[in-house]
Image (cartoon, helix red, strand yellow):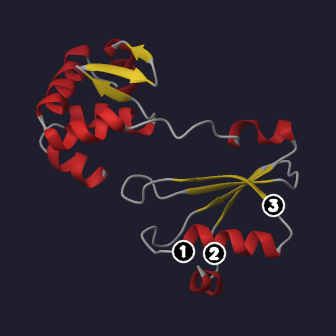
Amino acid sequence: MWNTIKKHFEGHPERLKVARVLVENGLSTKNQEIFLNQIEIPPVRIARVAGVDRRTVNETLNEIASTPELRIIFEEIRPAGHSLKEIAKHLNLGVVEITPVDAKMPGILANSAMVLTKGGLGIRQAIVDDPESLARTETHSNRGQEDTRRTHPTAAQRQRL
């Protein structure tokens, strides 16, 4: 998906910034307006986050509306839902972030779940990002941990993943 979006905004890095904000936040576009589910978001708010002016946001919306391949993506995109990562400590949950060597490799989430389960950890939530845009997997465990840990698999673990 991200490669498709990047291809359409080649030569327009400012518009690509706007598209990234939309994708990262699960914001959809319809009739050249921006929505978070049913809530309309003013272009000036997106402009501030993307570090561009409002006109650039409107130009990006025009391009999305006039390009069928982009329109399909941005009209149907939705937020992934809430992430427990920021509040896990307060809920007595631990957070494990897994950064794979090759995010396009199949079975990363399944094998990670097996490793956690064998270690006696239950999974309350798993969030997986598109390997084309942000290669990161978050898993929230029901064993209370005080901190957020970023793990990097060893060579043996990479073979299993």
Q: Left of 32 or right of it: where is 125?
A: right
The amino acid on which the numbered mark 2 sits, given as a three-letter code, is Asn
Q: Residue at 54% across / 74% down in the picture?
A: 107
Q: Secondary structure at mark 2?
A: helix
Q: Residue at x 58, y 37 (%)?
A: 81
Residue occupied by mark 3: 122
Amino acid beneath label 1:
Gly
Identify the element where label 1 is drawn: loop
Determine which residue is flagged by label 2.
111
Where does the C terminus fall, quadrant-wise?
bottom right
Find out whether the residues at labels 1 and 2 contact each other: C-beta distance under 8 Å.
yes
**Which corner quadrant of the image does residue 86 belong to?**
top right
- What residue lies at 25% left-to-right and 22% top-to-bottom? 57
Q: What's the mark number on residue 69?
A: none
Q: Earlier in the sequence, mark 1 or mark 3?
A: 1
Identity, as a three-letter code, of the amino acid under mark 3 = Gly
Residue sitting nearer the eye, 86 or 32: 32
| Pointer 3 local density, CA inside 10 Å: few below 14, some 14–19, many at least 20 | some
- Mark pair 1, 3: CA separation: 18 Å
Q: Which mark is residue 107?
A: 1
Q: CA distance from mark 1 to mark 2?
A: 6 Å
Along the polypeptide, which appears first: circle 3 or circle 2?
2
